[in-house]
Amino acid sequence: MRTSNYLLSTLKETPSDAEVISHQLMLRAGMIRKLASGLYTWLPSGLKVLRKVEQIVREEMDKVGAIEVLMPVVQPADLWQESGRWEQFGPELLRIKDRHERPFLLGPTHEEVITELVRKEISSYKQLPINLYQVQTKFRDEVRPRFGVMRAREFTMKDAYSFHLTEACLESTYQKMHQAYCNIFDRLGLEYRPVLADTGSIGGSTSHEFHVLAESGEDAIVFSDSSEYAANIEKAEALAPQTERPAAQKSLAKVATPNKHTIEEVSNTLELSPNQVIKTLLVVGADEEGQESGVVALVLRGDHELNEVKAEKFPNVFSPLTFASDEAIKEAANCSAGSIGPINLSVPIIVDHSAAYLADFACGANEDGFHFTGVNWDRDIQGYQVADIRNVVEGDPSPCGNGVLNIKRGIEVGHIFQLGTKYSEAMKAGVLTETGKHETLTMGCYGIGVSRIVAAAIEQNHDKYGIKWPTAIAPFQVCILPMNMHKSHRIPDIANNLYQELQQAGCEVLFDDRKERPGVMFNDIELVGIPHVIVIGERNLDEGVVEYKNRQTGDKETIKIDEVVNFIQSKLTA
Amino acid sequence: MRTSNYLLSTLKETPSDAEVISHQLMLRAGMIRKLASGLYTWLPSGLKVLRKVEQIVREEMDKVGAIEVLMPVVQPADLWQESGRWEQFGPELLRIKDRHERPFLLGPTHEEVITELVRKEISSYKQLPINLYQVQTKFRDEVRPRFGVMRAREFTMKDAYSFHLTEACLESTYQKMHQAYCNIFDRLGLEYRPVLADTGSIGGSTSHEFHVLAESGEDAIVFSDSSEYAANIEKAEALAPQTERPAAQKSLAKVATPNKHTIEEVSNTLELSPNQVIKTLLVVGADEEGQESGVVALVLRGDHELNEVKAEKFPNVFSPLTFASDEAIKEAANCSAGSIGPINLSVPIIVDHSAAYLADFACGANEDGFHFTGVNWDRDIQGYQVADIRNVVEGDPSPCGNGVLNIKRGIEVGHIFQLGTKYSEAMKAGVLTETGKHETLTMGCYGIGVSRIVAAAIEQNHDKYGIKWPTAIAPFQVCILPMNMHKSHRIPDIANNLYQELQQAGCEVLFDDRKERPGVMFNDIELVGIPHVIVIGERNLDEGVVEYKNRQTGDKETIKIDEVVNFIQSKLTA
């Protein structure tokens, strides 16, 4: 492609509304343009990357026997009413009405549609297992779309759904899909981690997320330094201390802590380490039907953070986890949020293992401006439950039993689930078994955020000059950069020849034939992130060479003109 | 692909709600399934065809320098308000609101979005011309979706938009796109015709439609038997008679025609040929602002049909063309619809050339139960306008001046337009010219109904057994059909070997390895329409041969087993 026939559309300035680097670089490199909040047009070079990701995903799905279908973007409401998700889903489900006032929705996911298809098309165990996938536009009406295509409203996903007669068969396909996902990220050239994950609102039992590692990642992922164990921090178990709790040595005392609310303020005032102070959080409780009812106290060591996913799994805690209002706190503890403590607190109390292991610690006195010191479990506080409700921290022992945990940041780009019978039961999808019995199907589902991968790849691969594409998903593999071509007698011929030869050799080449200053062209190509750059300059031609620059490593070398094609081919097959 | 690992899903019965053959066959062959009215899931074999059509379209677009982008399905209303189409479009434009109650729509077409993009990205004449395209999901909320994917609500289109500084430049790109469309339909292996077309509500001047010829086509297309002239019947000009009108010979007489209303009844009663009787249609008129105002009379020869597209172009005719109500007819002509005539009718009268050429003809007397005979223009009727307002008929002289017109049925699958400045003016899309002047852009737009082509190809290529795919878009090129494989010692090895060899040779093979009766397998494969079929039977193996059957021609021949791969390859490259 010649730049003069292309829509490169690079920007010098960073658009002010782009917060994260991938969003900034996708705008600056002319990959996307915003049409409206959370809606983006993919410009030519962005679309090339998107299609390459799509194609790799498609090939790896085909390899493990998944079969491609295409389901509509617009879905009828009745299927969602059948599964129960029409009511369960919040306003991120965009509900619409057609001209006859019939209710539809823009699909954020396709479990209902595929289950409807399978219950009609699959009637015998002989047709199982079956694994169907699509690459399709999805819509989620995010309350605050942001980060460009990372959290857009309209986006491209690959979603696969497998159907089985037995759990064992599901497990087998799940493992194949896990491997296919690893193959996809390997081929994309991205550093990634599959991690154990919570199943959340999708439901089911086992689940893994695939994270592209990047410092800017929204998720914390933890892994053992000595084993394969890896999990989302939401899911990672914090083991209970293995030794006995120290014996109580101090006696209970109430001390004034005027205007000290945070753990830091209180521990400084009491001259204690934050890990000798506990924090007590009041959250909304739940009755037996899961409706809001009263409050529950959650107790953590001062230096630890609450894990909301773990906490909201307790039946007496309301889900989604909701902190108690100031009024409810006042009513339950007779104080404000910074002074709550478990002593004489007459609400259910759930204590994290690490907090329950402390002796002679400090806590709020349920009286504004006062804390207790020398507090000890059982002696001073009774009637509490001990459980894992905190986020793990670096150095915690790995729950697998081997090594200690490290934490990295990741961007979730894939999620696979052993769904079980959640949808097939609600929608009555079953088959006749070999013995003629009707059996409900067992399901798996497997998603990859195709458009999100593009942004995640940039978060992981960039520098201050722009994007550094892995070759597999670069918009072009090679760029020919002739310097001041229009002032030269020799350069145009050599550049045109090289362009044709590289194309004939099967390379995807961008030939920057613009009448621009060399600096402008260099900056654009570095910004766009083409991996292999051939610079043709008048001076080098005297020696019959051109300059090669590798965008990833920054390495430069001179190459004889007649060796360029072989050199580039060796780079592309490396 | 092995059938046992695939989702073939053929149906024996024709679904009762499928009216046209392509819809029936797409359902029976397991290509699509209905999710809701006008919404279809593409099953694996259907999707393969869709993707092949897409790919051919994409390649031909790339060849003429069009650049692929991808615009959102969901579009903000404000751009459509700017172009004026938010109000102009009827309820087939699905208007939706997001969670913040902001108005959006599901895109039926993308003129506004591309013009918004181009006015922001293109600022200089140096960047022109530019031709951008996408293959994207569209939505039109048809009042009565039908014929399967032929007239679905959600469908796949390729839409391209070109931008130019001059009309001459637009004309040049338009010609290139016209040729690209011809190349596409040639490669698809379809019999088609590009025809002159009306520009309709899209606007602009020159326009061509591309029709796949099929007896079931909704459109009539006309073409000269002696030249390249071809047009949609909506657009085809009916030339005025070239000779003088015969002189009046009869005198005006009023005759009773009790209960005779249709041309057939009246001409039989009066013992006249239908082409000696005229029909007078009253339609709603328009004032200078185009608002409904009064009625207008349209006069045609009895054997001719009104061309509504031609008629609604008259400024004093309301658009869209609307027939006058019984009350309005009564008021204007003092009779009911079957007895209207132009004599003493005090409304504007537009007379078709052929009707105006008649002498001594009959017409309604504006009195129920009476007609006039021996009527003559000018002597009996004054104050009328003569124009072309009828559909051409077979045998009419071609408007190009060469030959006479034939009529065939076609399915519109492509439409290209020289749009001019309709959108660029409304949306202020312009550039600076070489002399620093601001110039409004001139636009072309070019659509292909990708999913509709799949149905049109079937309408043109089928027999009573099923689909007869052109090889270029068949879901599989070759099918291996082993007869009673599970009862044979030799067949499984030979079938498996052939399967592997054909795949290695780059063929797309379906290996029907089901334990089904040969008849069931034959019927399924004929229904699905795979072009090249290799039948492996026990008896033929004694002679070291297999049977080859060509789905298109029905030809059969026996092929030596070790020559099958070469034979098939020669068929595929033929």
Image (spheres, coloured by chain):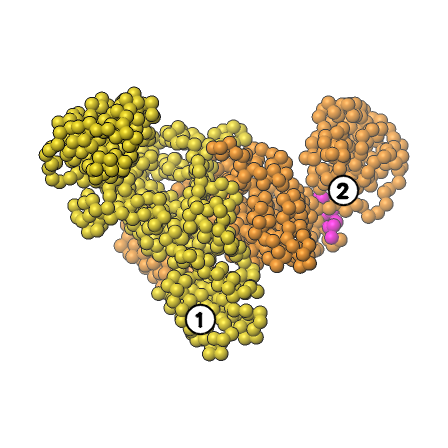
Chain colours: A yellow, B orange
Residue B287 percent location from the top left of the image: 76, 32
Residue found at the far bottom of this picture: A543
Question: Please, which chain is the residue tagged with disc 1 on?
Answer: A
Residue at position x 25%, y 33% from top?
A: A279
Range of magenta residues: B392-400
Residue B211 percent location from the top left of the image: 60, 48
Residue B242 percent location from the top left of the image: 82, 48
Asked if the residues shown at circle 2 and circle 1 are in contact, with their CB atoms under 8 angstroms apart, the answer is: no
**B3 relative to A252 in the view: left or right:** right
Q: Eyeballing the image, is B9 above or below A89?
A: below
Give the residue type that dot 2 points to. Answer: Asp
Q: Which mark is residue A547?
A: 1
Q: Secondary structure at mark 2?
A: loop
Q: Secondary structure at mark 1?
A: strand
- Return the residue at label 2: B388
Question: Please, which chain is the residue tagged with disc 2 on?
Answer: B
**How would you rate the neighbour count of disc 1 (Cα within 10 Å): few for under 14, some for 14-19, many for 20 or more?**
some
Give the residue type that dot 1 points to. Answer: Glu
* Foreground disc of the pair 2, 1: 1
Residue at position x 43%, y 46% from top?
A: A19
Residue at position x 73%, y 46% from top?
A: B237
Q: Closest to the observer: B172 or B394?
A: B172
- Inspect this view and state whether residue B145 appears: no
Residue at position x 54%, y 49% from top?
A: B158
**How would you rate the neighbour count of disc 2 (Cα within 10 Å): few for under 14, some for 14-19, many for 20 or more?**
many
- Inspect this view and state whether residue B239 appears: yes
Q: Eyeballing the image, is B312 above or below B193?
A: above
Main SS, magenta region, reads: loop
